Amino acid sequence: MIATGADALAFLVELGVSAHLVRHHELVLEAAVELCDGLRRRLGARFDAGAVQIGAALHDAGKIEHPAELSGPGSAHEAAGRELLLAHGLPEHLARFCVTHGDWRAAPHTRSLEDLLVALADKLWKGKRQTELEALVLERLVAQLDLPKWRVFEIADGVFEAVAARGDDRLARSTIATPIDLP
């Protein structure tokens, strides 16, 4: 059973995903933990942080079936990841993150706050701010909180920036040393 982000990472290892892909998921999970903690602590936001963290730790699982997308563009891994996770007994509410992290623009107002937070963590981990995605997250937060919109923006923007500010460090840790075959 997958109950935590750490469980999700262990599941990826069991599936035999590459060390590079595991590292990517570790770093996106790290960003998701910071994002969730910041929004809950500083705003009192309500969402399923456990699902966000599991989603962050599994969102690119489909790249095991589409390895060309490890180093190049593509979205075939999204549906493939969902199907892979469902085939291994994961529930739809967790498997969906494989699709929603990449297609949040397709139907943004049908995406849950959790869907949007996984997508945002997948941007912020490397220091990339995504204004359109952040605006959707802010919209969901304003709807649930008894705070003026400007205050929610001010606080959430600080959380987003704090997570993004560690992007260079995460990028530096994203490379995996591979042994060199010497003659």
Image (spheres, rainbow, N blue to C red):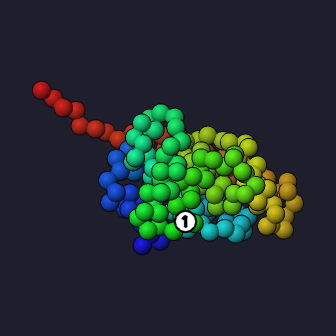
Furthest residue toward left: 183
Quarter of image, res 178: top left
Residue drawn where x is 79% and y is 53% of the image: 153
Looking at the image, residue 37 lies above or below residue 59: below
Q: Nearer the viewer, residue 162 or 85?
A: 85
**Image-based side of 149 in relation to 90, left or right:** right
Under mark 1, the amino acid is Glu
| Number of numbered discs on residues | 1
Which residue is at 47% across, 71% downward?
3
Q: How crowded is mark 1: few (under 14 residues within 10 Å), some or many (20 or more)?
A: few
- Could you tell me which quadrant the C terminus lies in? top left
The spot of residue 93 in percent (x, y) is 57, 66
Q: SS class of the residue under badge 1?
A: helix
| Image position, residue 85 (x, y; %) | 45, 60
**On the image, numbered disc 1 is attached to which residue?**
92
Residue 146 sits in quarter: bottom right
Query: Please, is residue 157 above or below residue 145 in the view?
Result: above
Relative vertical location of residue 122 with respect to residue 142 in this rendering, above or below: above
Closest to the observer, 97 or 82:
82
Q: In which quarter of the image is the N terminus?
A: bottom left
Q: Which residue lies furthest to the top in this view?
A: 183
Residue 64: where, in percent of width, then height? 39, 48
Give coordinates of residue 59: x percent, y percent: 51, 53
Q: Can residue 48 be seen in this view?
A: yes
Image point 52% across, 61% down: which residue?
95
| Observer able to see residue 155 | no
Which residue is rendered at x = 45% and y = 52% of the image?
Answer: 61
Q: In this view, does 142 lie to the left or right of 11?
A: right
Q: Is 103 left or right of 53, judged from the image as shown?
A: right
